[in-house]
Amino acid sequence: MSVNVQRLCAALLLLVASGWAHAILPIQHWETRNGARVLFVENHDLPIIDLSVEFPAGAAYDGKQKAGLARMTNRVLQLGADKLDEDDIARRLADVGAMMHGRFDTDRGGLALRTLSSAKEREQALGVFAAVLEQPTFPANVLSREKVRTIAAIKESNTKPETIAAVNFFRLVFPDHPYGQRQSGEVETVEALTRDDMVKFYRDHYVARHAVVALMGDLTREEAAAIAERVTAGLPAGSGAAPELPAVSDLGKGDTRRIAHPATQSHILVGAPSIRRNDPDYFPLLVGNYVLGGGGFVSRLVEEVRQKRGLAYSAYSTFSALQRKGPFMIGMQTRRDQTDEALKVVDRTLRDFLEKGPTEEELTAAKQNLAGGFPLRIDSNGKILEYLALIGFYQLPLTYLEDFVKNVGRVTVADVRAAFKRHLDASRMVTVVVGAGQSPDRTASSTQQ
Amino acid sequence: MKIRNDIAALLLALGLSSSAPLLAATAATDASTVATAPRSAQTSEYALDNGMRVIVKPDHRAPVVVSMVWYRVGSVDEVTGHTGVAHVLEHMMFKGTRDVGPGQFSRLVAAAGGRDNAFTSRDATAYFQTLQKSELPLALKLEADRMANLILSADEFKREIQVVMEERRWRVEDQARSLLVEQMMATVLKAHPYRQPVIGWMNDLQNMSVEDARAFYQRWYGPNNALLVVVGDVQPDEVFGLAKKYFGPLKPRALPERKPQVEPVQRGIQRITVKAPAELPNLVMTYRTPALQDPEHDWEPYALDVLSDVLSGNEAARLNRSLVRDQRIASSAGAGYDSVGRGPALFQLFATPTPGKNAAELEQALRREIRSVVDKGVSAEELERVKAQSVASHVYERDSMMFQARQIGGLEIAGLSHRHIDLFLEKLKAVTPEQVQAVATKYLVDDGLTVAYLDPQPLPAERPAPPPGGPDHVR
């Protein structure tokens, strides 16, 4: 296929895709009486309602001494509310085929619900959801059991090379920032958590004025408005502004840790702090990272590491754009005796990309995929709900989806090169290797040959 | 296959996709969750003269299409010494034809805004693309090309087999629970090839050649062993026209005879222990049970499906309530049963003990739960709950075109029909408490049981990490 024809196709797609997004995704936006932001897309194709309510209540709000608090609060929240014990909650939801789950990541904490839109099912599911969100009881006996389970899971994951790598990576990339703390908490910090901690965290963070309600599916605007009121009216009022996270410091220098582990593969992570979600460089980095390691089979990392050398099954790079500067991360796993070779390939690929950026052909291919693939990003209710929650939480423009294709389309090679230079420096990267220890252990893998 | 919570991790070894970060593997052929009112949208079914079948399900919610080419060949068709070859061939299918160079398949799909990948299971190998609807012809053209014209070069194979071995290390060798499941399957079954891991034994991978992959391709890859499933914003007759255009000219192959390979009767309980690095023990109990053969007249598979849901189909189900919440003997516990497949169906219980409890105590607790169903049966309320969930699940599944495509393909590959989807729900709704009790009594018995324990091994004492910027700085 000639490049010209492809360009033409891409140009056409820009029009088609952006027009379609606007046509099917008119996002309605308002505030509840007590100040929660609501984003709603009405769609009656399926008899389903998706709902999420999120707060600045993610792991980053744990505080230094209480790693694991935000996550445990989110978990125990769902296990007792008003007069309902955990079995009542589970039964009432299951009886109508509803699914409720916690929403939890670095920045965000909250709750999501999927239910049938028919009256009986919807009413019962929303009743449970509202009670859980607005009147959690944090039962002490449930907390003590969940602490035991969480600690067991932490200890189990401490044996896994991928966890050991991730925990050390985040500590080194964010040495003085809550983003460096383990989301599950550590054995000692979880052990020390109390019911009072949870109640206080809930009161301080699950606050109506800081809530984002995302609603998608088989509802009218009036019904959506009533639901948004119902699931926020009883939330804590809170005091003052939304909690702030400290700024992330850039790394002063690079750092490398090798941690011995008997696994047959070394797990490798390379990275550094990168960008905030509302950074103007978001699109140049998105497009550039597609070329570097975000584009799967067609990315440079996969080409160099897997296709050309057979060194790994998976190799990737990602930017996690968060409230504060989230991590840029390259990851892969390779047989332990090839660890050094793999590290060299990763280093060379990254340095070359930072220096020269993508070629024109690579940039075009990246834009074709990101623009042409735009409809795939919003082809289900579930995916659309994710975008509504994201747009609401990070206060992105309501036209974010409409503008997505346009913003991808205007990125140039120079933009990508400049953006990567502004945010990343190959000489100030954290490298963590778990597997082959101080020096590659050749004997351990000889049986694999 | 029912995959829930931590069970998903245990079952990873049973199905593989070419690039994990692109697509989380999900299994789609669960008879209990495929049918409901409102009834499934209409599908259209066609056959080409060369024997290839085409099934189209319109879904006009977004201008997107999912295209999947299924080959009715998986690890179940492999012979001893050649395990893993179906999956290795899946990887090699991206290495080019005369007209499309190595790696170009994915580049062309990506440039059209699409995503592509593939997976190999015990029963089938499937290749799929998700695209803007106008790009469907590209997907079909490329698939037809590699169905007939794949170039298997020794040079590409040499690197790709290394990639597959890395995949095996990542999925199995370094994963205690995957090792447990792999060893367990090789113990549960003696004759049927479901006993072999989909990814293959490491020694077989080490000794595999490009000729092995080529022979497998020439034996099994032809239109008469393939099924095209398209779900999305399309008109069925147009898809059929495109299929005729691209796949129609391909010649059918003489397919090898498939032997029945019926598994001999198990004659007593089997037990194994697997030692691997981990913190907590783990336990899998596997019972031999019947698979769905005749969707109209069978009733036992439906009852087993309901039994599995009564045990762990929702948060309020028995194992979670009793073992995790009340007795606090398990950190997690679940049940699974897959009635749809080309081979034997197994009923499994999985559990991890809480710290301080061991696998033997947990096994006794699981047995008490089984005993309770056998002695006292299940309540009407539990059954209603399970059925309500099945109805809802079916509606939710319609939010994913990929799920629908996998569901249709999985049923067809197993020798059932996607047209039974609505029947499954009716059958499930008709299951009685007595039937659930009856299948538990008949099949959850020691003579058909295999118990597998994971015996966790401590890691060697951790060496201290060097100080920042220490001497082994690699950059």
Image (spheres, coloured by chain):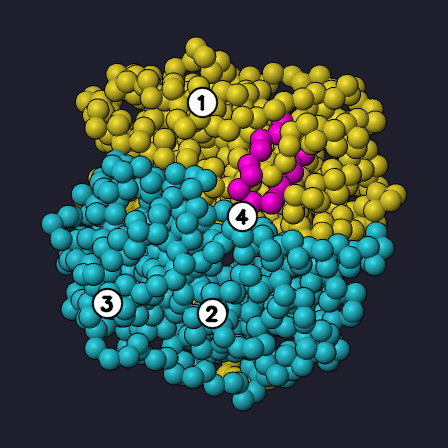
Chain colours: A cyan, B yellow
- Spatial CA span between label 3 and label 2: 21 Å
Viewer-proximal residue, A117 or B27?
Answer: A117
Q: Is residue A156 left or right of residue B113?
A: left
Residue A396 disc label: 2
Looking at the rendered structure, the secondary structure element under dot 1 is: helix
Q: Residues within 10 Å of mark 1 (few under 14, many from 20)?
A: some
Say yes or no: labels 4 and 1 on the same chain. Answer: no
Three-letter code, disc 2: Leu
Q: Residue at x 43, y 74 (%)?
A: A323
Q: Which residues are magenta?
A: B55-78
Viewer-proximal residue, B243 or B337?
Answer: B243
| Residue B27: in magenta span | no
- Spatial CA span between label 4 and label 1: 25 Å
Q: Residue at x 78, y 70 (%)?
A: A359
Q: Residue at x 61, y 83 (%)?
A: A422
- Spatial CA span between label 3 and label 4: 33 Å
Say yes or no: labels 4 and 2 on the same chain. Answer: yes
Looking at the rendered structure, the secondary structure element under dot 4 is: loop
Residue B342 disc label: none
